[in-house]
């Protein structure tokens, strides 16, 4: 049986317990509020800390004393004067022009030097026509028959009968001029590299030819000159069509390409050998297609 004193003590302990619980609850709430405030202050303070420049270990802090010391070491520094300082901008250096390749002398090169390409050509319009075309790949003048061939240019040579107003004989650049002006049809060509020695031999043979007849015609002339230098021999049959067949059998092309020439580059050869010379052709010899 509990006494009154015991009951009183029990009630007092209960009240103290409740008070302690309230204090603990208050402290928890107070602690949470303080923590939230600290978090908020920390978040708001981050940008300002981030923007604040803090010198690192390699950062040099410029002070007035440092500036004074630098000025003392450099008394003539441009920063110490009030005068305008002319800034000199360097000009771009001039690049010297690359000199062009010097012209070579044909007589100074060795005999086995390749100086160009020689072609035997045909086209079939009417009875047809056959001729020789030589294109230079030599950086200098060289003689082809009576004609002085300029560097990297070309010259054609062929015999004509009455289709040229200047009469039968050997002509230079008629094929190049008329072929580029009027066009070619059913053509063929066979080419080879030509050396200095071969060109000299070919040139000498060309200067010995200034005629045309029904057998020693354009076909015979083209085959004769070609055979002076080439190992692929062409039989000089009478008709260009028969020459074309041989060209194609020997691996030739069905195309002919010649460089353009001016009217003033077209000539007829007069005389033979040491007496051979060139005469300018008339306008009428250039006004018809090849045949």
Image (cartoon, grey):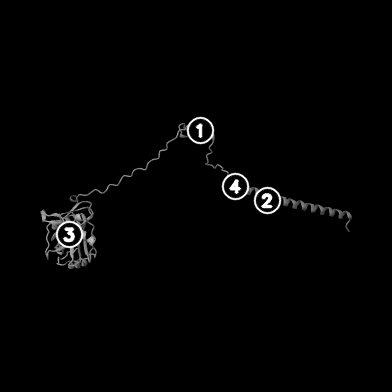
* Distance (Cα) linking label 1 and label 3: 96 Å
Q: Are marks 1 and 3 in contact (CB under 8 Å)?
A: no
Residue 251 vertical placement versus 260 (above, below): below
Numbered disc in front, either 4 or 3: 3
Q: Are marks 1 and 4 in contact (CB under 8 Å)?
A: no
Residue 37 vertical placement versus 76 (above, below): below
* Distance (Cα) linking label 1 and label 2: 51 Å
Classify mark 3: helix, strand or loop: helix
Classify mark 2: helix, strand or loop: helix
Residue 287 pos. (x, y %): 19, 60
**Label 1 neighbour load within 10 Å: few <14, some 14-19, many 20+:** few
Residue 91 pos. (x, y %): 37, 41
Q: Are marks 1 and 2 in contact (CB under 8 Å)?
A: no
Viewer-nearest residue: 191 or 151? 151
Disc nearer the start of the sequence (3/2): 2
Residue 100 pos. (x, y %): 27, 48
Numbered disc in front, either 1 or 3: 3
Res 71 visible: yes
Disc nearer the start of the sequence (1/3): 1
Q: Are marks 3 and 2 in contact (CB under 8 Å)?
A: no
Disc nearer the start of the sequence (1/4): 4
Q: Quadrant of residue 134?
A: bottom left
Residue position for label 4:
47
* Distance (Cα) linking label 4 and label 2: 19 Å
Residue position for label 1:
69
Residue position for label 2:
36
Residue 228 pos. (x, y %): 15, 60
Viewer-nearest residue: 212 or 145? 212
Disc nearer the start of the sequence (1/2): 2
Residue position for label 3:
284
């Amino acid at each position: 049986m509990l006494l009154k004193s015991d009951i009183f003590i029990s009630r007092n302990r209960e009240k103290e317990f409740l008070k302690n619980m309230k204090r603990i609850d208050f402290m928890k709430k107070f602690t949470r509020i303080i923590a939230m405030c600290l978090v908020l202050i920390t978040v708001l303070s981050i940008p300002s800390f981030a923007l604040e420049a803090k010198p690192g270990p390699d950062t040099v802090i410029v002070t007035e004393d440092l500036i004074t010391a630098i000025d003392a070491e450099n008394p003539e520094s441009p920063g110490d004067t009030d005068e305008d300082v002319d800034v000199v901008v360097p000009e771009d250096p001039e690049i010297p022009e690359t000199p062009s390749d010097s012209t070579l002398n044909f007589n100074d090169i060795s005999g086995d030097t390749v100086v160009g390409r020689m072609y035997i050509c045909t086209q079939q319009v009417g009875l047809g026509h056959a001729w020789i075309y030589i294109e230079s790949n030599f950086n200098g003048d060289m003689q082809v028959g009576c004609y002085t061939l300029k560097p990297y240019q070309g010259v054609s040579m062929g015999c004509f009968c009455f289709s040229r107003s200047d009469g039968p004989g050997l002509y230079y650049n008629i094929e190049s001029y008329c072929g580029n002006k009027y066009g070619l049809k059913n053509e063929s060509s066979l080419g080879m590299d030509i050396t200095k020695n071969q060109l000299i031999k070919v040139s000498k043979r060309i200067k010995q030819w200034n005629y045309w007849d029904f057998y020693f015609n354009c076909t015979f002339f083209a085959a004769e000159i070609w055979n002076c230098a080439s190992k692929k021999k062409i039989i000089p049959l009478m008709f260009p069509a028969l020459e074309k067949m041989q060209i194609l059998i020997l691996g030739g092309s069905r195309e002919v390409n010649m460089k353009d020439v001016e009217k003033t580059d077209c000539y007829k050869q007069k005389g033979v050998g040491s007496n051979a010379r060139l005469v300018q052709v008339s306008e009428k010899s250039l006004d018809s297609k090849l045949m």
